[in-house]
Image (cartoon, rainbow, N blue to C red):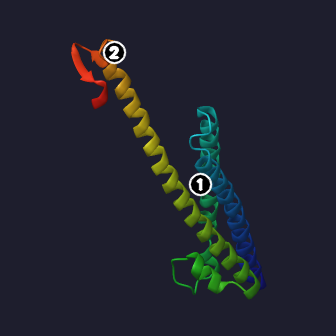
Amino acid sequence: MTTKVSSQKNVLVSLQDILETEIELHQALREQLQEEASGFGVLSGNELLRIQRTKDKIVEQVIRQEAKRISLVDQFPRLWPQQPSPFTLSVIIQLAPTEQAKALRYCFDELQNILSEIRSLAEHNSLESSARLKSVEASMRFLTEGSGRQQATYSGSGELQHSGSKVSRTSV
């Protein structure tokens, strides 16, 4: 029986380690999103690409950690055969001894908070990026539509002239 308890404790410790690593990775992702959010209109294209590459690398690491966590949680039915599936983090916390349960609860709560912040930042950044893209598209449209026209000039009477039409300067 002590081998089973030892195995249970080991998987709980491993789960806590994985969750703590996930917290660190999500914190790093949040920092990148914050840098991106504060840099709109200030950061160069290269700096934005650097941030994007860093975010991509962090997400890849998160995916690997989640795969480890899923693989580890797959061992739980064997170690706690009396407990019906699914083994969610909430269920696992209830199975853990008090001290480990507290640590796992902290990890769970911290991850939930960070993920909420990440969602909010990502949504904000998405809206900001979309607005900037629309602005660039409008500028491009203006430039390409205007490229077929002659250069606008003013007549002696102060009227804007281009493509044969006249627009009064006061009506603009």
Q: Nearer the viewer, residue 82 or 124?
A: 124
- Give the crowd class for mark 2: few <14, some 14-19, many >=20 residues within 10 Å: some
Distance Cα–Cα, label 2 vs label 1: 62 Å
The three-letter amino acid code for the residue at tag 1 is Ile
Q: Return the x and y of residue 9 as percentages of the image width and height.
A: 75, 78
Q: Return the x and y of residue 76 as percentages of the image width and height.
A: 61, 75
Q: Return the x and y of residue 82 as percentages of the image width and height.
A: 57, 87
Q: Are marks 2 and 1 in contact (CB under 8 Å)?
A: no
Q: Which residue, given by chain and number where applicable, does mark 1 sit on?
A: 63
User: Which secondary structure lies at badge 2?
Assistant: strand
144 horizontally vs 69: left or right: left
Q: What residue is shown at x 60% (from left), y 60% (from top)? A: 66
Q: Quadrant of the C terminus?
A: top left
User: Which secondary structure lies at badge 1?
Assistant: helix
Q: Is there any visible trace of residue 66 in the rendered image?
A: yes
Tell me if residue 88 comes above or below residue 71 in the rendering: below
Q: What residue is shown at x 74% (from left), y 67% (from top)? A: 17
Of circles 2 and 1, which is in front? 2
Tell me if residue 102 comes above or below residue 56 in the rendering: below
User: Which residue extends farthest front?
Assistant: 157
Q: Nearer the viewer, residue 51 or 97?
A: 51
Q: Which mark is residue 106?
A: none
The three-letter amino acid code for the residue at tag 2 is Tyr
First in sequence: mark 2 vs mark 1: 1
Q: Quadrant of the N terminus?
A: bottom right
Q: Nearer the viewer, residue 42 or 69?
A: 42
152 horizontally vs 5: left or right: left
Q: What residue is shown at x 33% (from left), y 15% (from top)? A: 154
Q: Which residue, given by chain and number where applicable, does mark 2 sit on?
A: 154
Q: Nearer the viewer, residue 57 or 13?
A: 57
Q: What residue is shown at x 73% (from left), y 76% (from top)? A: 7
Q: Return the x and y of residue 48 as percentages of the image width and height.
A: 60, 39
